[in-house]
Amino acid sequence: MTTTPQDSAHHRAMLAKAETLIEALPYLQRYAGRTFVVKYGGHAMGDPELALDFAQDVVLLRAVGINPVVVHGGGPQIGAMLKKLGVESSFVDGLRVTDKATAQIAEMVLSGSINKELVGWIAGAGGTAIGISGKDGRLVTAKKVARTTRDPDSQIEQVVDLGFVGEPDVIDTTIIKTAIAAGMIPVIAPIAPGADGATYNVNADTMAGSIAAALGAARLFLLTDVPGVLDKDKNLLTDLTPADIARLAVDGTISGGMIPKLETCVHAVEAGCEAAVVLDGRVSHAMLLEVFTSKGAGTLIRAG
């Protein structure tokens, strides 16, 4: 029996797939039964193809014995709804100043349309997801965020009232563990109650980092709109420690919105998460490339 060129090409393609699975095997063994916390947001949320890829990745992780927990953002969607309703908003250090009306709209968008859309994507990819927020099962109790700014003329520090903007204070992971034990993928909106009974809008990166630490997660993934942390020559830095990050902040290599993301990673790995990864959510299956290949796909942060 002769082998045609087409048969040979097909054999090579099948062999490549087999080799990919073999390369992934040690990582599958390492992470079986472990938890990954994934912060999902940015432009990837608005791209249907990338959303489908993300849902497939999460379902695959669950199918191979890893427990994914998704925490999602929604800043652009909140902004669009505020604009549609004629509500003006401002920002301080990247955090939206949130009055009571804005907090209600944020909860409607985050816990409502975005959360349930994500649950639907995962269901469409063959998974079983449950949509919750920090309010459910006492998952997160928030405290009000305090920020100060320095007057450029007098150099006097002034307290800025951000309104109903919070950060995690107490976390009870019971509802997450219950959902995982029942075979479900928790999808969490970053809304949480305070001890004062108010509802707070929480930064999704901060929420994800705190939950990853509380769960002792194997990985925290922050899906962003950049490849990871870049040096001054725009080369990807693949492995960092908290000490590296402090040095890069001092010399100006990292700045702007990357600083709070890396602060979240440092907090998570110093508080119980094994490692955190900043990677590009615009790249198809970036999370799988990071987890199941030797080269990875983003910037890995370990406690050192």
Image (cartoon, rainbow, N blue to C red):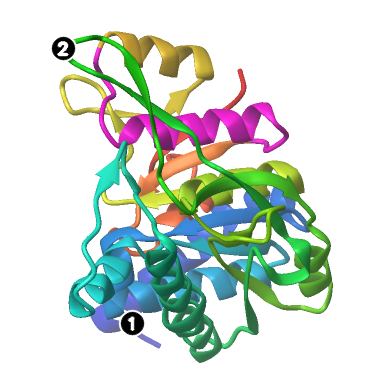
Q: Which residue is mark 1?
A: 7
Q: Where in the figure is residue 107, as x and y percent of width and height?
A: 48, 72
Q: Is residue 217 visible?
A: no
Please give the name of the residue rendered at 39% of the width and 41% of the height, measured from the top-left corner.
Answer: 298
Which segment did they paint magenta? 252-274
Quadrant of the rendered structure where residue 249 is?
A: top left
- Between 234 and 40, the one lying in front of the other is 40
- Residue mark closest to the camera, 1 vs 2: 2
Residue 83 vs 226, above or below: the answer is below
Residue under pointer 2 = 153
Q: Nearer the viewer, residue 7 or 205?
A: 205
Quadrant holding the N terminus? bottom left
Residue 266 lies, in percent from the top left, at: 55, 28
Residue 155, above or below 118: above
Q: Residues within 10 Å of mark 2 (few under 14, many from 20)?
A: few
Secondary structure at badge 2 equals: loop
Residue 187 highlighted magenta (yes or no): no
Question: What's the amino acid at mark 1?
Answer: Asp
Separation of disc 1 and disc 2 at Cα? 75 Å
Contact (CB < 8 A) between labels 1 and 2? no
Label 1 packing within 10 angstroms: few (<14), some (14-19), many (20+): few
